[in-house]
Amino acid sequence: MSHPNSLPGLRGLDRASVESILDRAEVLLSVVDGDRSMEEVATERVDPAVVGLLFMEDSTRTRGSFEVAVHRLGHRPVTLVGRGSSASKGESLLDTAANLAAMGIDALVVRTGLSGGVACLAEALPLPVLNAGDGRHEHPTQGLLDASTLRASLGDLQGRRVAIVGDILNSRVARSGIHVLATLGAQIVLVGPPSLVPWRLVDVVPGARIEVSHDLDAVLEAVDAVMMLRIQRERDAGGSVASDYRNAFGMTEDRASRLAAGVPILHPGPVNRGVELDDGVLEDKSRSKVLDQVRRGVAVRMAILERALMRPGSRD
Ligand code: CP
């Protein structure tokens, strides 16, 4: 059975838990920004822990911000990546993770190309296992940091209409985004070419209001926020993407100018400049939240690590 503090995904996480994590991240953001010390915002004394970071796929933001979060909390990271570990000799993900667990680490953060792989590790190992992105399945800390960024721009997300645009088929960011936004009461519009928008996601959250559109221009003027997605070429999305993708689904400067005032534009990174976002949109600080997402990602991962490492019985 999975450790109670594991986080394989956002599916099934209730609204009170999501809001508790986001509220705690808001407090921890003051530590990230250097305005308060960890001692000032600590809720309980936690012994220094060792956190394993197992990244079998490349990462800049998730790995970097988990490492920063571990340090900010006063813990120590031990990082293993695919190339440079014995995975290159054929050792399985489960054996690699079990060996790290046998070294006595206190929690394990995992990125893997295997959809559902993190849930399997969480079932098999006796320690908290946190999903840092697994194949096309979920990327829960990204979903939470996106929700944190949207709340900072829009306040309560209940009834807000959020467009998720692009390669939804291959995107774990979209799946976690759908779960967390639906849990917080937002309306969701999935926008992209027919080859990249699976209709089955419309029913993925019972009771959620999820629409599909293949016409970005038709939804632009009626949304409160836009979450652009990266085209996942490493997951074979390239073959499904027309050469004029930018013209149909890119956030060009012209499209950004048609959004209502204050509508934030998010992107999980890395950005394919000139494809998903024009340079001018990415650099427009009045709309682009891309670096604020990264800043908030550290605070969200601190909140998730605190939750993972807290003493039994001290969960809210
Ligand atoms: N958003 C995101 O997961 O970025 P990285 O792949 O750089 O971690």
Image: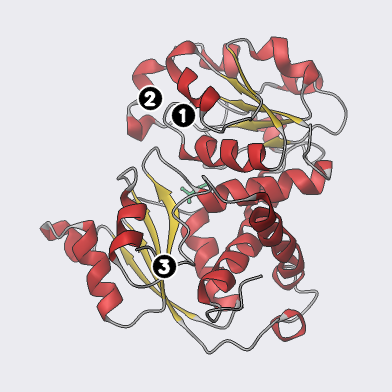
Question: Spatial distance from mark 3 to mark 1, Cα to Cα?
Answer: 34 Å
* Residue at 44% over, 54% down: 8
Q: Nearer the viewer, residue 126 or 278?
A: 126
Is residue 42 at least partly visible in the picture?
Answer: yes
Q: Residue 251, how many percent across, how many down?
A: 65, 23
| Colour scheme of the picture | secondary structure
- The residue carrying pointer 2 sits among few (fewer than 14), some (14 to 19) or many (20 or more) residues within 10 Å by Cα, namely some
Image location of residue 237, percent across then percent down? 38, 25
Q: Give the quarter of the figure containing the C terminus.
A: bottom right
Q: Secondary structure at mark 2?
A: helix
The residue that label 1 is drawn on is 231
Which mark's residue is nearer the viewer, 2 or 3? Answer: 3
Question: How crowded is the residue under tag 3: few (<14 C-alpha within 10 Å), some, or many (20+)?
Answer: some
Q: Nearer the viewer, residue 90 or 209?
A: 209
Residue 237, disc? 2
Q: Which residue is mark 3?
A: 3
Counting from the top left corner in percent of width and height, residue 149 is at 72, 48
- As rendered, which of 54 and 209 lies closer to the eye? 209
Q: Residue flagged by tag 2: what amino acid is it? A: Ala
Q: Are marks 2 and 1 in contact (CB under 8 Å)?
A: yes
* Mark 3 element type: loop
Residue at mark 2 to residue at mark 3: CA–CA distance: 34 Å
